[in-house]
Image (spheres, rainbow, N blue to C red):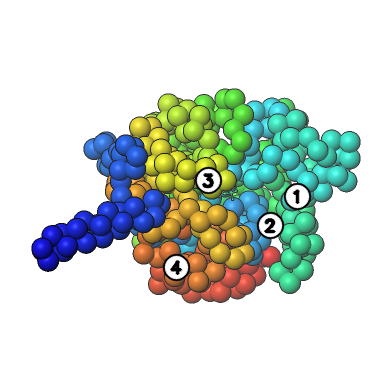
Amino acid sequence: MRSIYTVVFFAIFVFSACHSEDKNKAGNNYEGIIVKELNEGARQVRDNMKKDIVIAHRGSTYWTPEETEAAFRWARNIGADYLEFDIQLTKDSVLIAFHDNTLGRTTNIADVFPGRAELEINEFTLKELRSLDAGSSFNSANPDRAKDSYEGLKILSLEDVVMIAEGYRIKSNKGLPEQEMVNGQWTGNYVYEKDPDDNGNRPGIYIETKNPKPGVERILAEKLGELGWNINKDQKEISAEEGKVNIANSPARVILQSFSKESITKLEQYLPGIPKCFLLWKAKMEDDLKGNYIKAINFGVDNNVHIIGPSIAGEPNNYGELTAGWMAELIHSSGMLIHPYTFDTEKQLNDYNDRADGVFTNRADLALKFYRRESDKSPQEWLIELGYH
Ligand code: G3P
Ligand code: CA
């Protein structure tokens, strides 16, 4: 009789334990949806990427005006593995590095084109965009880190960022960027020169198609090909030094990312075999977090994605938690890597160290120190060396 009680008690215990388990805990079979796994080809592309990579988010939003020459020269010299930026298409079909759809937050659009300040970027030509000041708003928003030399920084093209990664800078003529002229007309592009303050690092580029307009992925593939950065075409050998960052000469020199499923599929169509990251945003997933999480991973597996880019919690951004332990277990069980965004503090680097394979960070200085690859100069010293006073 006693043994019957024991069996009944045990059965009740097991039953209640199973049912009290938080349905969001790990376990790769959720209501019939099973986490898929990367195929062999995708694993090979994945293995071209290093672990613990430091991805300089918009160059840096902390030290410099985001996605400007100051941001990317700083990130290159301090030793970031990748320069991260968002691409947008201009009215004349040029790819530029710019985060927002509109220009109000980070430029003086309201002063230069007062009647057009609310328009989206694709309503402006490259030349019009080059007339804006993309540096001064940083100074107003961050008086403790403001620098006179940030005033007048230009919006960059994709080509400008690639040239910075290769160790160049925009040539200055009497304090202004030198314009590339063809038949007496400015093309909208600038002239480059070897950066006298380049310290030999050759980072890769980590490009996000942001709110992608039709044709962006095809134009991106063509432009990367022209620049010698498309590994599917004749890829250019970039001069490099022993002991420096040299991702620019690896098969993972470019990583592509998007929140848009449609864009991910087009990136795979035009740029196959290049590592891809599917970014996640919590508000879109909350109605069934675990189900949606597994579906997002499976979308990635089905579309040759190699990385999931989830948000992290905590100050200062306070994004939704999408990199909890159980979530990371699901991603890794598929064979994909995890590059969460965006790291701004040492606490965040510590909290997620057991699961992040790389970090999007505004503080490449902190992340490099965390991974014991600290630069020989402080962030401020690099800025001064690069001419930003
Ligand atoms: O690209 C990773 C992260 O940058 C996504 O957020 O808004 O900063 O582009 P956002
Ligand atoms: Ca981005």
Marks 4 & 1, CB-CB < 8 Å contact: no
For marks 4 and 2 on the same chain, the one whose residue lies earlier in the sequence = 2
284 sits to left or right of 387: left
Q: Amino acid at mark 1?
A: Arg
Q: Are marks 1 and 3 in contact (CB under 8 Å)?
A: no
In this view, the mark in front (4 or 3): 3
Instruction: Answer with mark 1 or mark 2, whichever residue precedes in sequence.
Output: 2
Dot 4: within a 10 Å radius of its alpha carbon, few (fewer than 14), some, or many (20 or more) residues?
A: some
Residue that carries the numbered disc 3 in the rendered image: 286
From mark 2 to mark 3, how far is it between C-alphas? 33 Å
Query: Could you tell which of marks 4 and 3 lies nearer the N-terminus?
Result: 3
Query: Which residue type carries mark 3?
Result: Glu
Does residue 160 appear left or right of residue 256 in this picture?
Answer: right
Q: Which residue is mark 2?
A: 65
Horizontal and vertical percent position of residue 212: 59, 33
Residue that label 1 marks: 105
Q: Quadrant of residue 284?
A: top right
* Residue 202 appears anywhere in the view: no
What residue would you read off at disc 4? 351
Q: Nearer the viewer, mark 1 or mark 2?
A: 1
Q: Earlier in the sequence, mark 1 or mark 3?
A: 1
- Most extreme residue toward the front, as rendered? 1
